[in-house]
Image (cartoon, helix red, strand yellow):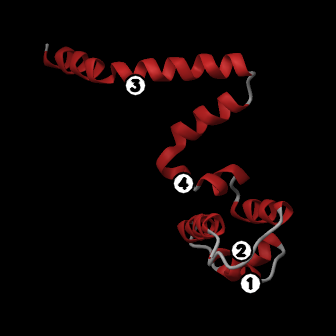
Amino acid sequence: MDTFLKKLGDSIRSFRTAQNCTLERLAERADLSPNYLSDIERGQRNLTIRNLEKIARGLNVPVYQLLLGIQPAANDDLLELVALAAHTDAKVTAFITNIVKCIVEKLPDLRKSVKRIGET
C-alpha cells in the first residue's frame, strides 16, 4: 500500500469525521461515489487533483490542509500564519520565518518574564 495515499486517506477521514459527516454525505457534496471515497480513505485508490479539490470543497477546507493533515481547530493560529506567508514574496516569507524563529528561541526567557510580571 502506498504510504502517501494512506496518509492522505487518513487525513480526509479525520476531517470528515471531525465534521460528523458521513461518507455518503461527503460523496454527495463532492459529486463522487461513496465506494470511491471509501477506497480513497483506506489508501487503496489513487485520485486526481481535480477529485482532491472536490473532496476539499465538500469538506470546506483548503486542499493543502488535506495534504498536510492539519486539523484547523487545533492549529488555527498556525494556519493563519502559513496563509499569510503563502501570499507574500520570498523575502517577506523569509522575514516572517526569522521573526518566528527568534520568538521560539526566546520563548523560555519570555515565559520567565511574564511570570515575574504576574507576580508583582
Q: Is residue 46 above or below residue 111?
A: below
Label 2 vs 4, first from the N-terminus? 2
The kind of residue tagged 3 is: Val
Q: Residue furthest bottom?
A: 35
Whole-number angstrom distance, CA of label 1 to CA of label 4: 23 Å
Residue at which label 2 appears: 26
**Residue 101: x %, y % from top left:** 46, 22
Residue at which label 3 appears: 104
In the picture, the quarter occupied by the C terminus is top left
At 42% across and 20% down in the image, what residue appears? 103
Q: Secondary structure at mark 1?
A: helix
At 20% across and 21% down in the image, what residue appears? 115
10 Å neighbourhood of mark 3: few (<14), some, or many (≥20)?
Answer: few
**Residue 57: x %, y % from top left:** 77, 60
Label 1 vs 3, first from the N-terminus? 1
- 8 to the left or right of 50: left
Q: Nearer the viewer, residue 57 or 46?
A: 46
10 Å neighbourhood of mark 2: few (<14), some, or many (≥20)?
Answer: many
For the question of whether residue 6 can be seen, the reply is yes
Q: Which is in the foreground here, disc 4 or disc 3?
A: 3
Q: Which is in the foreground here, disc 3 or disc 2?
A: 3
Whole-number angstrom distance, CA of label 4 to CA of label 3: 22 Å
- 91 to the left or right of 71: right
Q: Secondary structure at mark 3?
A: helix
On residue 98, the disc is: none
Whole-number angstrom distance, CA of label 2 to CA of label 4: 17 Å
**Residue 51: x %, y % from top left:** 82, 66
Label 1 vs 4, first from the N-terminus? 1
10 Å neighbourhood of mark 1: few (<14), some, or many (≥20)?
Answer: some
Residue at which label 1 appears: 34
Residue at which label 4 appears: 71
The kind of residue tagged 1 is: Pro
